[in-house]
Image (cartoon, helix red, strand yellow):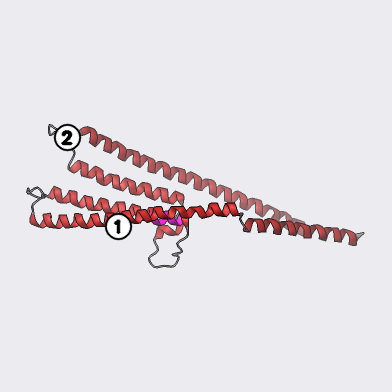
Amino acid sequence: MSEQTTTVHNDNHHGDNHRDDYRHDRRQSPNKLGYALFLSRWLQFPLYVGLIVAQAVYVWRFVLETKELALHGFSGLGADGGSFSESDVMLTVLQLVDIVMISNLLIMVIVGGYETFVSKIRLKGHPDEPEWLAHVNANVLKAKLATAIIGISSIHLLRTFIKPDRLAGGEIDVTAVLWQAVLHALFIASAIGLAAVDRIMSGTEDMSRQHRAGIHAEPETVSTKGNLS
């Protein structure tokens, strides 16, 4: 009777192992439709190539702006034949800073987006690997983009304060300045909201991991008590 019970137990054990192996094989080998959908991520590749072209355009604009700054700055004459004042120099420099910040934004979108949504770049250990790329994900990318947009908006707002738009009568266009300030405040509020949502989601994921760890640790505790008894 004991031998029959042992045989039945072994058969059941082998059957469970077979079912586990079958489930493992199904998880390891995706179906053709799922694999085709997964390959569709490469349709984004031309989009990132287009952003690289936009980056090249901004580099060319930076060269032209630098050339204009050097010519007018050293000569002291503006493009209209008037004087090239310190405010004009500051506005041109702010234009250069604006181009650099937009280029940084493009780099984050190109590299971070490709790493997150298309394919791994595998730069681990490379001396030029960006620090933020090691832990990039969709939430981190959104937070960095929001911060970059706030910086770009700050540059535009500062340019407006230095040289505001004027109406036909020569008066300052207060409405345009006000709307730029409101939009800048909205960008800041959006960045704070994204940071708060990311913090809440990170806390929820940590609690979920701790809960799963507790569930997996409980059977081991029960098994240990059974062996001691």
Residue wearing tag 2: 172
* Quadrant in the rendering for residue 48: bottom left
Reply above or below: 186 against 21. Answer: above
Query: Looking at the figure, which quarter contains the N terminus?
Result: bottom right
Q: In front here: 152 or 198?
A: 152
Inter-mark Cα distance, 1 to 2:
36 Å
Residue wearing tag 1: 56
SS for tag 2? loop
Instruction: Indicate which disc residue 73 carries.
Output: none
In the image, which residues are magenta? Answer: 110-115
Reply above or below: 189 against 52. Answer: above
Based on the picture, tell me whether residue 114 belongs to the magenta stretch: yes
Magenta stretch, main secondary structure, is: helix
- On screen, residue 38 versus residue 77, left or right, reads right
- On screen, residue 221 versus residue 153, left or right, reads right
Q: Amino acid at mark 1?
A: Ala
**Residue 168 horizontal/vertical position (percent):** 14, 33
* Quadrant in the rendering for residue 21: bottom right
Foreground disc of the pair 1, 2: 1
**Residue 19 horizontal/vertical position (percent):** 73, 56
* Quadrant in the rendering for residue 13: bottom right
**Residue 184 horizontal/vertical position (percent):** 30, 40
Q: In front here: 75 or 199?
A: 75
SS for tag 1? helix
Q: Earlier in the sequence, mark 1 or mark 2?
A: 1
Q: Amino acid at mark 2?
A: Ile
Neighbour class for label 1 at 10 Å: few (<14), some, many (≥20)? Answer: few
Question: What residue is shown at x 44% (from left), y 53% (from top)?
Answer: 44
Question: What residue is shown at x 35% (from left), y 42% (from top)?
Answer: 188
Query: Looking at the figure, which quarter contains the C terminus?
Result: bottom right
Neighbour class for label 2 at 10 Å: few (<14), some, many (≥20)? Answer: some
